[in-house]
Structures are given as C-alpha cells and as structure tokens.
Image: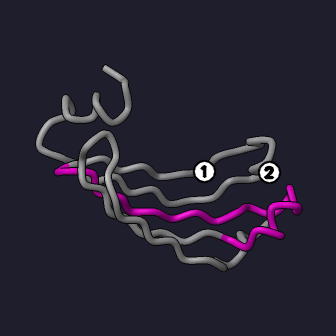
Amino acid sequence: SAPQDYAFGLKVKGQYHGQKLAGTGKIGGLLALQDAAKPFPLQAQVKIADTSIALAGTLTDPLNLGALDLRLKLSGSSLGNLYPLTGVT
C-alpha cells in the first residue's frame, strides 16, 4: 500500500537537558492513524547542540507499532555527546 500524504508540519525550538534544540518535520494526518494498513509518513530533522538527527520513513499501524521503515542519520563532533541526550553509552 502506498504511504499517505503529509498533512502537518512541525517546528520546535527550545532546550533539552540544558542544550539548545531546534527542529522541523512533517507527518501524515492524525485521522489517518486509524487505517492500520496504510503506511503513515514521518520526516524530522533535529539539531541539539552540535549533534544533528534526521529521520525519514513510514510507520505501518503506528498505534500498535506494526512495522517501521525508517532511515536514521546521526552526526556530530563525537558520539560521546549523545549520552546526555539519549542515556545510551
């Protein structure tokens, strides 16, 4: 099944764990979440301090996490900088 069209744009700005945060994104329509068979589109770019995160793809049956088809890209000066943001070492 073909993904749905994007319906909403998102924009964030603020702080996360004391670090500057800014980002943009877009998602499918909220009522479309009821159609579990149709992939729900998701795209986001976030910058936290000098770390950048980009995510693009689709979620199928997102309310039950049926399937994920996503590309994730992380970049920054050091992967060690991700620990305060994610808690993952």
Is 48 a magenta residue?
A: yes
- The vertical placement of 16 against 45, above or below, is above
Residue farthest along the left direction in this orientation = 77
Q: Position of residue 80 (x, y in %)?
A: 19, 29
Q: Element at badge 1?
A: strand
Asked which quadrant contains residue 81, the reply is top left
Residue position for label 1: 69
Q: Amino acid at mark 1?
A: Asp
Region in magenta: 28-50
Name the side, left or right, on which 55 lies relative to 84: right
Residue position for label 2: 61
Could you tell me how far apart the alpha carbons at marks 2 and 1 are, in whole angstroms? 12 Å
Is 17 a magenta residue?
A: no
Viewer-nearest residue: 36 or 46:
46
Q: Amino acid at mark 2?
A: Asp
Name the side, left or right, on which 33 lies relative to 51: right
Identify the residue shown where x is 37% and y is 25%. Answer: 87
Asked which quadrant contains residue 32, the reply is bottom right
